């Protein structure tokens, strides 16, 4: 998502003609880094304030990225991580049940081999 917006931002805000292009979209690396900062809320006010000062189109562009990233992309990442966690938990529970059953069988086998006349 960020790379698509970075490429579009580099063409929408050229470095030579706009202050925002020179500040935030000078290269693909710089664009990706600024969108990551915007996504993690480290540098959100400076990016948004600059966008509002430049034009409404640029502020709508930044707002569209924030809404799309927060409400779709981050939820998608969270769903993938949670699905991986549930899979690991299922495997752990299954392994624990197998170990429990195997240990019970060993314990009962040992108890069956004991002489009943001797005290424990």
Image (spheres, grey):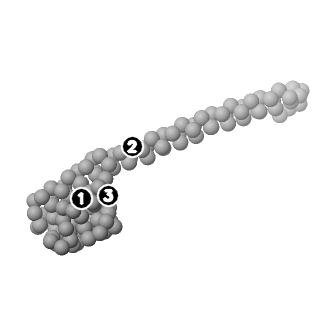
Q: Label 2 belongs to which residue?
A: 79
Residue 93 visible in this rendered orientation of the protein: yes
Nearest to the observer: residue 65 or residue 46 = 65
Nearest to the observer: residue 19 or residue 102 = 19
Circle 2 residues within 10 Å: few <14, some 14–19, many ≥20: few
Q: Label 3 belongs to which residue?
A: 3
What is the CA distance from the residue labelled 3 to the residue labelled 2?
21 Å
Mark 3 or 2: the one toward you: 3
| SS state under label 2 | helix
What is the CA distance from the residue labelled 2 to the residue labelled 1?
27 Å
What is the CA distance from the residue labelled 1 to the residue labelled 3?
9 Å
Residue 68's x, y, as percent?
25, 49
Report whether 45 appears left or right of 32. Answer: left
| SS state under label 3 | helix
| SS state under label 1 | helix
N-terminal of the pair, mark 3 or mark 2, is 3
Q: Based on the displayed image, in which of its 4 quarters is residue 110 positioned?
A: top right
Mark 2 or 1: the one toward you: 1
Rendered residue at 87%/26% (across/down): 116
Q: Based on the displayed image, in which of its 4 quarters is residue 27 positioned?
A: bottom left
Nearest to the observer: residue 41 or residue 16 = 16
Rendered residue at 28%/52% (across/down): 69
Q: Label 1 belongs to which residue?
A: 8
Report whether 12 appears left or right of 27. Answer: left
Circle 1 residues within 10 Å: few <14, some 14–19, many ≥20: some
Residue 71's x, y, as percent?
27, 47
Q: In which quarter of the image is the C terminus?
A: top right
């Amino acid at each position: 998502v960020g790379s698509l917006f970075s490429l579009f931002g580099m063409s929408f805000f050229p470095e030579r003609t706009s202050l925002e292009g020179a500040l935030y979209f000078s290269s693909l690396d710089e664009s990706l880094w600024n969108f990551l900062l915007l996504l993690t809320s480290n540098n959100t006010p400076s990016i948004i304030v600059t966008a509002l000062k430049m034009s409404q189109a640029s502020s709508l562009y930044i707002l569209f990225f924030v809404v799309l990233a927060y409400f779709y992309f981050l939820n998608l990442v969270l769903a993938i991580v949670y699905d991986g966690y549930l899979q690991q938990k299922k495997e752990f529970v299954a392994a624990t049940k197998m170990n429990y059953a195997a240990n019970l069988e060993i314990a009962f086998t040992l108890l069956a081999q004991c002489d009943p006349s001797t005290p424990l």
